[in-house]
Image (spheres, rainbow, N blue to C red):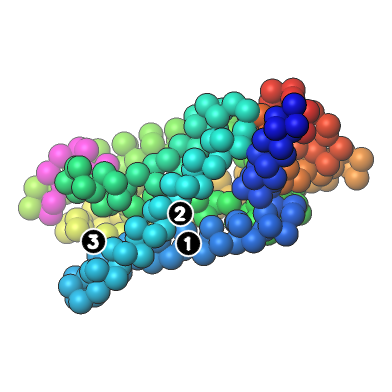
Amino acid sequence: MKAHKIHSGWKNTLHEIIYEADTPLGKLFDLVLIILIVLSVVLVMLESVKEIDVHYHKVLLTLEWVITIFFTLEYIARLISIKKPWKYVFSFYGIIDFVSTIPLYLSYILAGSQVLLAVRAFRLLRIFRILKLVKFMGEASQLKAALKASRAKIAVFIYVVLILSVIMGTIMYLIESDEAGFTSIPRSIYWTIVTLTTVGYGDIAPQTNLGQFLATVIMILGYGIIAVPTGIVTVEFSRHKKGQTAASVVHTNTQACPSCAAEGHRDDATNCYNCGDLL
């Protein structure tokens, strides 16, 4: 019984350090983790520069192995510190952690797998847990609610833009010749979308006066179209914020469930909202 308590004790301590950012050791661990994540992304970028890779390949590879081993140990520690490891394995962060850990191992098995090293950048999402930005968590919840409330309007807007792109692209195909680059309707639609979004690659350009006039109209429409989704989300965000009272604000923390690793619990929560186990 005593051995069982000791075993549970170190697992709970390990869980608090790895999964939570409320303790000094937890903050230190996550801070070190973020530094290594940023360093790993920098290493990937440096390796892509041939001049640097030729002169410092061994140094870069050694640092990469050190970081990969740390990520591997961290992944294993996350598995053994919770009661239901599969909950973490198949969670969003679990999948990101796994994919960001295996690239270096795969590089010795599969050719061209080095490009997967860049996915480590996704782990920078943990910075919100590390800095314990509860205020930002609340703002993120409001933004999520605003996006959810405006999804129908945005869907209709995108549908209208797609119809407009098809119509304008077809007209431009009829106006311009193959020599101008408008060789098919899909290619003309591609040009319309590029112009409408004010990207303007310049790989295709209308040559006729009528085509240039239509392009001008599409460019002007583009400026108005860009502002529409922003306005929709802003209105919903303001409406949600005005309707929120002090009593309705839900304060969350960085506490993670020791059973299923679920995060985002309320400050007054005693049980996990996901599995029901005691926090």
- Main SS type for the magenta part? helix
Relative to 203, does residue 176 appear above or below in the rendering?
Answer: above
Q: Nearer the viewer, residue 38 or 6?
A: 6
Which residue is located at x 43 percent, y 47 percent?
A: 72
Magenta segment: does it hold 212?
Answer: no
User: What residue span does the magenta drawing correspond to?
Assistant: 180-191
Residue type indicated by callout 2: Phe
Query: Does residue 263 appear anywhere in the picture?
Result: no
The x and y percentages for residue 168 are 31, 42
Q: Which residue is mark 2?
A: 70
Q: Which three-letter amino acid code belongs to the residue tagged 1?
A: Leu
Q: What residue lies at 68% left-to-right and 42% top-to-bottom?
A: 10
Give the vertical position of 164 relative to 62 (above or below): above
Identified by mark 3, the residue type is Gly
Residue 29 image position (x, y, % from top left): 61, 57
Quadrant location of residue 232?
top right
